[in-house]
Amino acid sequence: MFKYLEYCASDKMGDIIKEDLDRHFAYLKECYQYAKEYSHDKSTWNSAKLIRNDGIPIAIEANRVMEGIEPTEEILTKRPDKYFYTGHAEERVLWKALDMGFTDFKNSTMFCPWYACHTCARTILGFGVGRIIGHQSPMDWDGEIARKGDGRMEWLPSIEAAWNMFRKRGVDFRYLIGKIGGVENLHAGRIFYP
Ligand SMILES: [Zn+2]
């Protein structure tokens, strides 16, 4: 099991109060529910929700093939094609928010159970998002899943690069530990109960 928190926990963890924590878990639960319903991906469901820091919800998105492009079985299942065609939840929610006219990314928090690849990290930094909150469970699952040599993307080095960029830019990023309950999630082809 990967002990992500040993090297990525924010030292600002203490500033989250109990009410915040309950709310944050509720957002993560909503992300899991949304991902299950709307993700196109046949292997991993993920979604991201953007909240302005005064509590106003801005947008939510899942990992999906871009609008206007038919998510054919071939696109969705063939590697590496699915990586080329599937937009990640983190980038999609940012573009969606911008499209809606939202610009206050600095004072917003992105909730996303499993984040972030290096490409999404660059997008997150480009938009200037101030804080990202994920869930420890999928980080652990990813570490536990044996590589099958089936062309599956090796995400961990990509995620480490993302953390490096977040640290250098002073982004407050963290992963909440604890059970969500009442939801299921597909990760690397396996169903988990976060
Ligand atoms: Zn990504």
Image: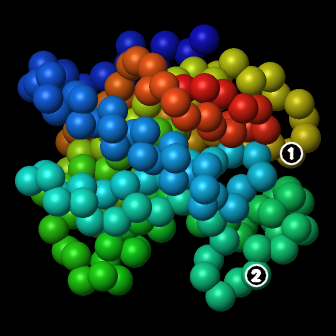
Residue where numbered disc 1 is placed: 151
Query: Does mark 2's beta carbon lie closer than 8 Å to ligand 1?
Result: no
Q: What element carries label 2?
A: loop
Classify residue 189 as left or right of residue 50.
right
Q: How far apart are marks 2 and 1 (CA)?
A: 23 Å
The quarter holding residue 101 reads bottom left
**148 to the left or right of 19:** right
Amino acid at circle 1: Gly
Considering only vertical position in the picture, is 153 above or below 194? below
The residue beneath circle 2 is 70
Please give the name of the residue rendered at 57% of the width and 42% of the height, measured from the top-left corner.
Answer: 158
Residue drawn at (90%, 68%), measured in percent from left and top?
74
| Residue 164 seen anywhere in this rendered image of the structure | no
Q: Which of 114 and 6 is in front in this view?
A: 114
Q: Where is residue 39 in the image (x, y as percent from the top left)?
A: 63, 58
Residue at the far front in the pictured view: 182
Q: Which is more N-terminal, label 1 or label 2?
A: 2
Residue depicted at 61% across the width and 34% down the height: 184
